[in-house]
Amino acid sequence: MSWVLASLLSALFLGVYQLCTKQAVNANAVLPVLFWSNVCSATVWLALITLDFALAGNPQGTSGLPLFLKVAPLDWRGHALLFLKSLLVAGSWICSYFAVKHLPVSLTAPIRATGPLWTLAGALLVLGERPSSLEYLGMGITLASFFGLSLAGAKEGVDFLRNRWIGLLIGGTLLGTISGLYDKYLLGTEGFDAATVQCWFSIYLAAIFLPIVVGWWRRWWTRNDFHWRWSILGVSFGLLIADFLYFDALRQPEALVSLVSSLRRGSTLVAFAGGLWFFGEKNGLQKLPAVLGIVAGMILTVIG
């Protein structure tokens, strides 16, 4: 599969993941959704580890799974680094999922797509980097579009300055940005492969959410009821497939990282269209210019 097709399919499944997330948490308890979706992901990776072990030990001398699915053995330090990755993702998802439950997906998907802007801002403020002209242009377009999206949201009673769910969504996006920067450290400086990171952070996420969901089940706080929905499987497998295709695109020698990341932003359009189509969300025409502006701004920021 070409890296362009893999990137586009990754965007499609990432959009499906966002739509399934909205359907799974809509009028439902958020914490069990997070727990069971991660249990599904962890089960897939545990099954792959078991299969790899069985294949490697068969009489035919098979080496096991393909290299890109192999999970490398880790020492205690490696496990600690990946557990920290899981803590970052857990915080990001708790914030984001509660926000997605209470906000239209046609608003949340574009906001969640602004991660590269916050990464660039962090590099500018903390590391003293100097953005290029395209990156400055992308930042300007994104901020202007973000303001336009806030005006469209106001028509639905969503005040970007006072709405706590918007605050949680931005907090979740910022934590996701930190997690993305940490990924670069894990994959680059520490030399982890993608399968090992995906596998263990999925397993550790399920472990992190277990005591939280036990507290939910025992009613340690006021909470909503949980209803099993098949979209929970869509949350798990949508993200697994999207990430697998993304890493498959990146591992191809001719792939351009900036273009792969830019094509992946197409997930915003998938989620936006799905929000209007499946959930009957309003003000689509008023939001569309801002959504397109955010996508364009992110592409300029990535390729700049």
Image (cartoon, rainbow, N blue to C red):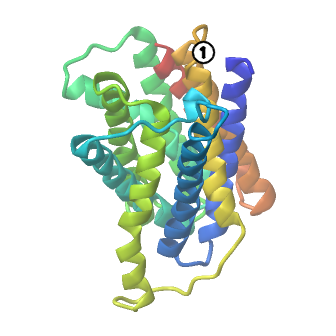
**Is 8 on the left or on the right of 90, as rendered?**
right
Given residues 203 and 56, the one toward you in this image is 56
Given residues 75 and 222, the one toward you in this image is 75
Counting every numbered tag in the picture gives 1
Quickly name the residue at label 1.
252
Question: Residue at point 19% right, 19% down?
Answer: 128
Given residues 266 and 111, the one toward you in this image is 266
Name the quarter where the N terminus is drawn: top right
Q: Bin the neighbour count of mark 1 within 10 Å (Cα to Cα): few under 14, some 14-19, many 20 and up.
A: few
Vertical side of 58 occupied by 235: above or below: below
Given residues 35 and 73, the one toward you in this image is 73
Residue 226 appears in the figure: yes
Q: Position of residue 176 (x, y in %)?
A: 40, 45
Question: Residue at point 49% right, 40% down?
Answer: 146
- Look at label 1 and name its amino acid: Gln
Secondary element at tag 1:
loop
- Examine the image and state in which quarter residue 247 appears: top right
Q: Position of residue 207 (x, y in %)?
A: 39, 65
- Examine the image and state in which quarter residue 26 appears: bottom right
Vertical side of 294 occupied by 166: above or below: below
Q: Position of residue 175 (x, y in %)?
A: 34, 47
Identify the residue at the far front of this view: 59
**Is 12 on the left or on the right of 242, as rendered?**
right
**Is 221 on the left or on the right of 71, as rendered?**
left
Question: Residue at point 27% right, 31% down?
Answer: 122
Vertical side of 21 occupied by 273: above or below: above
Residue 289 appears in the figure: no
Vertical side of 43 occupied by 186: above or below: above
Q: Position of residue 143 (x, y in %)?
A: 44, 34
Question: Residue at point 45% right, 86% down?
Answer: 223
